[in-house]
Image (cartoon, rainbow, N blue to C red):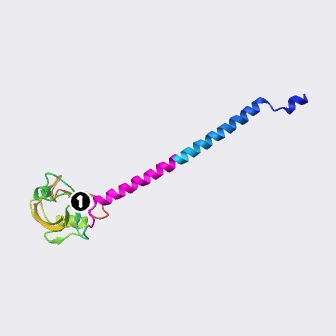
C-alpha cells in the first residue's frame, strides 16, 4: 500500500496537463487579440486622419467673417431660379450685412412672399449680386421662402 500512495494517480497528471494547455491557449488568444486590437486601432487612426483631411478639404479654405454658406438649394425655389449656387456665401440682404444664420432669418422676416430682395454673395473669391423674388414658405404663406439650406461656422444646417 505504501507504493500506491507514493505514485501520483494518472488523472492528476491529465488535469495538470489540461490546465497547462488551457493556460497556453488563453495566452495565445490574448496575444492575438492584443495584436488584432493594435492593428484595428492603427487603421482607425488612419481612417480618421483621412476623414479629417477630406472634411477640411471640402470646406472653403478661408470662410469670411460674415455670412452663411449655402449648402443645398430647393431646385425649384426662388434662390435657385435667381442663380444662387451651392457653395455661395450670402453676406448681405438689401445691403444689410448678415453675420450668421440668425441675422439671415431676421433680415428675411422683414419681407413678404412676393417681394424681391437683393442678395450679395461671395462666389469664386468675388462679390456678386442677385435679385431674388421670395416665395411663400411651404405650410406658412405669410412667411417668406428663399429656398436655401445653409450653415454658418459652428452651426447645424438650416433651411429658409
Position of residue 8 measured from the top left corner of the image (x, y, whole percent): 81, 32
Q: Secondary structure at mark 1?
A: strand
Looking at the image, which is closer to me, 78 or 42?
Answer: 42
Q: Taking 76 as reference, is 25 above or below it?
A: above
Q: Main secondary structure of the magenta part?
A: helix
- Identify the image quadrant of the C terminus: bottom left
- Identify the image quadrant of the N terminus: top right
Q: Is residue 118 visible?
A: no
Position of residue 4 measured from the top left corner of the image (x, y, whole percent): 86, 29
The residue under label 1 is 150
Q: Residue at x 32, y 63 (%)?
A: 154
Q: Is residue 93 left or right of residue 65?
A: left
Q: Residue at x 46, y 52 (%)?
A: 42
Give neighbour class at mark 1: few <14, some 14-19, many 20+ (Cα, 10 Å): many
Instruction: Look at the image and say whether residue 115 sits in the magenta stretch.
Output: no
Q: Quadrant of residue 67?
A: bottom left
Looking at the image, which is closer to me, 100 or 22?
Answer: 22
Q: Is residue 30 visible?
A: yes
Outermost residue toward the right in this view: 2
Position of residue 44 measured from the top left corner of the image (x, y, whole percent): 43, 51
Residue numbers of the magenta segment: 36-62
Q: Is residue 48 left or right of residue 114?
A: right
Looking at the image, which is closer to me, 115 or 9?
Answer: 9
Amino acid at each position: 500500500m505504501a507504493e500506491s500512495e507514493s505514485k501520483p494517480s494518472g488523472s492528476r497528471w491529465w488535469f495538470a496537463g489540461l490546465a497547462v494547455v488551457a493556460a497556453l491557449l488563453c495566452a495565445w488568444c490574448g496575444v492575438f487579440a492584443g495584436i488584432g486590437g493594435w492593428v484595428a486601432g492603427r487603421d482607425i487612426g488612419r481612417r480618421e486622419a483621412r476623414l479629417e483631411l477630406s472634411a477640411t478639404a471640402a470646406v472653403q479654405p478661408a470662410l469670411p467673417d460674415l455670412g452663411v454658406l449655402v449648402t443645398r438649394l430647393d431646385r425649384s425655389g426662388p434662390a435657385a431660379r435667381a442663380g444662387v449656387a451651392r457653395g455661395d456665401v450670402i453676406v448681405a440682404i438689401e445691403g444689410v450685412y448678415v453675420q450668421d444664420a440668425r441675422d439671415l432669418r431676421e433680415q428675411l422676416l422683414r419681407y413678404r412672399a412676393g417681394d424681391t430682395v437683393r442678395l450679395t454673395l461671395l462666389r469664386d473669391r468675388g462679390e456678386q449680386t442677385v435679385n431674388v423674388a421670395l416665395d411663400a414658405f411651404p405650410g406658412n404663406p405669410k412667411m417668406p421662402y428663399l429656398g436655401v439650406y445653409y450653415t454658418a461656422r459652428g452651426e447645424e444646417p438650416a433651411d429658409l
